[in-house]
Image (cartoon, coloured by chain):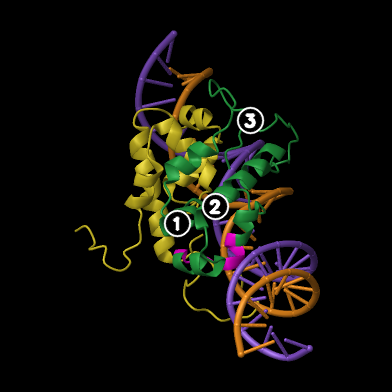
Chain colours: A green, B yellow, C orange, D purple
Amino acid sequence: MDAGRRGGRRLVGMVRTPLTPWERERGERFGALLREARGERSMVEVAAAAGVSAETLRKIETGRAPTPSFFTIAALAFALDLSMDELAAACAPPESGEALSA
Amino acid sequence: MDAGRRGGRRLVGMVRTPLTPWERERGERFGALLREARGERSMVEVAAAAGVSAETLRKIETGRAPTPSFFTIAALAFALDLSMDELAAACAPPESGEALSA
DNA sequence: TCTTATACCGGTATTTGTATCACGGTCGCG
DNA sequence: CGCGACCGTGATACAAATACCGGTATAAGA
C-alpha cells in the first residue's frame, strides 16, 4: 500500500506492516463513497457490471477490504461512472496544507 | 482484481484464481507508463515522495506486481503528476467496441 | 582502484485481496 | 406462511502485494 513511513517500526523480520487505524478508516470512507455512488442499484448488478464478485464489492463498501487493487477500483469506477482522481482526492491524507476539514 | 469471469474454472476449492497472462501483460504496460513518467528521477526519490518502498516501485514498474493497490497507485500518480483516469484508460481491456487503437 | 549511487534479482516473511461456501436476517409478494 | 431477492457475517482457501535482506552489475567520481 502506501506505507513506507507507516510508523517507524524497526522490527527486522517485520515486513508488510499491518494497516494503520487511519488506513482502515480511509477504507471505510472510501467504501462509503462507492456505496453512495451505487445508489439504488443492487450490489450484484454493479459487481457483475464491473466483473468482480459481489462479496468483494461488499467488503470494499463496508471497509473490510481497505486497500483494494487499482484495477478492481478502475472497473468499479467505470461501472459507477466515477472519477478515480476524485475518489483518490476524497480520501487524501491530511498531509501538508490540506487544512483538515473539521 | 477485476476477475470474476476470468476463465470459468469450476474447481470448488479453487478460490483466488491466478492472474491471467493478459493481466500480467497489462501490468507490464502499466509499469512502463509509470517508468516513462518518472523520467530522470531516481526510483528512491519517487518512491520516497509517494511513501512506498523502492522495491515496490521497482516491482510495479517491471510488471512483477501486476495488480497494485489503489492507494499505492494514487500516491505514485500524485508524485508523478499523473491522472489515474488516464492511467486506467490506457490499460483498459479490449472489451466490446473499444476498437483497439492500432 | 576504491567508493558511491543506481537498478536488478532471488529469497523470505507477513499481511492483505479476492473468491467460494454456508448461514442468518430482513423485506416484499404470492 | 413459504418463497425469493438482497444484504450481512463468518469461515476457508489461495494468490498476490508490500517490505526487508543480501548479492550482483553497471557507471560515474575522487
Task: Please tell me whether mark 3 or mark 2 is closer to you in this view.
Answer: 2
Mark 2 surroundings within 10 Å by alpha-carbon count, few (fewer than 14), some (14 through 19), many (20 or more): few
Q: Name the residue that disc number 3 marks.
A: A5
Spatial CA span between label 3 and label 2 = 32 Å
- Measured from the top left, where is residue A39 in percent x and y? 52, 58
Instruction: Read off the magenta span.
Output: A50-57
Q: Secondary structure at mark 1?
A: helix
Residue type (three-letter) at the residue carrying disc 3: Arg
Residue D29 picture quarter: top left
Q: Residues within 10 Å of mark 1 (few under 14, many from 20)?
A: some
| Quarter containing the C terminus of chain B | bottom left
The numbered mark at residue A80 is 1
Q: Is residue A53 magenta-colored?
A: yes
The answer to which of B25 and A45 lies nearer the viewer is: A45
Give the distance between the C-alpha atoms of the residues marked 1 and 2, in whole angstroms.
10 Å
Do the residues at discs 3 and 2 belong to one chain? yes
Residue under label 2: A36
Of circles 3 and 1, which is in front?
A: 1
Taking depth in this image into account, of B14 and A78 the one nearest to the observer is A78
Question: Disc 2 on helix, strand or loop?
Answer: helix
Examine the rendered structure and indicate whether residue B12 appears above or below residue A11: below
Q: Chain of mark 2?
A: A
Q: Earlier in the sequence, mark 3 or mark 1?
A: 3
Secondary structure category for the residue under label 3: loop
